[in-house]
């Protein structure tokens, strides 16, 4: 993901936690808040309950790739939190859980809807 598509500041994560709408399932917790821009930014969180550093980073890499592959509505800050079950989940299960939560939030673009074209810098 490009730098402008990532949440990096503590303040941005706190905003998502305080003001964001929350949905969860057995594998993930999703918090979404509008950011007032035309770029959707992602943040990925995996606490120690998920496992050691290697496991947590593997889960976050898989979630990052799953998020990159989806067509999400622009102008959102999305924080994806991994639950304990995410440690045993493969990529397909993580992606399925993420898609399910994004659909519940109404954050996925429907097929055939206009897609904003972004220029490469």
Image (cartoon, rainbow, N blue to C red):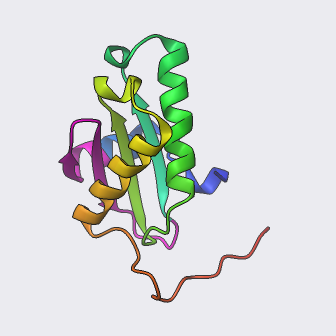
Q: Is residue 119 above or below residue 16?
A: below
Q: Is residue 21 above or below residue 58?
A: below
Question: Picture coordinates of residue 45 (x, y %)?
Answer: 41, 32
Q: Is residue 65 left or right of residue 49?
A: right
Magenta-colored stretch includes residue 30: yes
Q: Is residue 3 above or below residue 34?
A: above
Q: Which segment did they paint magenta?
A: 16-39
Q: Pick the residue in front: 31 or 109.
A: 109
Specify the quadrant of the image occupied by residue 68.
bottom right
Specify the quadrant of the image occupied by residue 103.
bottom left
The residue located at (36%, 57%) in the rendering is 99
Specify the quadrant of the image occupied by residue 69.
bottom right
The residue located at (28%, 55%) in the rendering is 101
Q: Pick the residue in front: 34 or 46.
A: 46
Question: Picture coordinates of residue 96 (x, y %)?
Answer: 37, 51
Q: Is residue 72 left or right of residue 85?
A: right
Looking at the rendering, in which quadrant would you find the C terminus? bottom right
Question: Picture coordinates of residue 85 (x, y %)?
Answer: 30, 26
The residue located at (21%, 44%) in the rendering is 24
Q: Is residue 14 above or below residue 111?
A: above
């Amino acid at each position: 993901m490009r730098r402008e598509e990532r949440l990096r500041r503590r303040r941005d994560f706190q905003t998502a936690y305080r003001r964001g709408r929350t949905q969860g399932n057995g594998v993930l917790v999703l918090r979404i808040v509008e950011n007032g821009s035309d770029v959707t930014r992602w943040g990925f969180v995996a606490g120690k309950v998920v496992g050691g550093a290697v496991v947590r980073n593997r889960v976050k890499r898989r979630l990052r790739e799953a998020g990159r592959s989806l067509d999400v509505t622009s102008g959102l800050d999305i924080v994806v939190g991994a639950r304990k079950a995410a440690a045993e989940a493969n990529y397909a299960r993580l992606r399925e859980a993420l898609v399910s939560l994004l659909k519940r939030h109404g954050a996925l673009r429907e097929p055939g809807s206009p897609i904003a074209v972004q220029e490469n810098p």
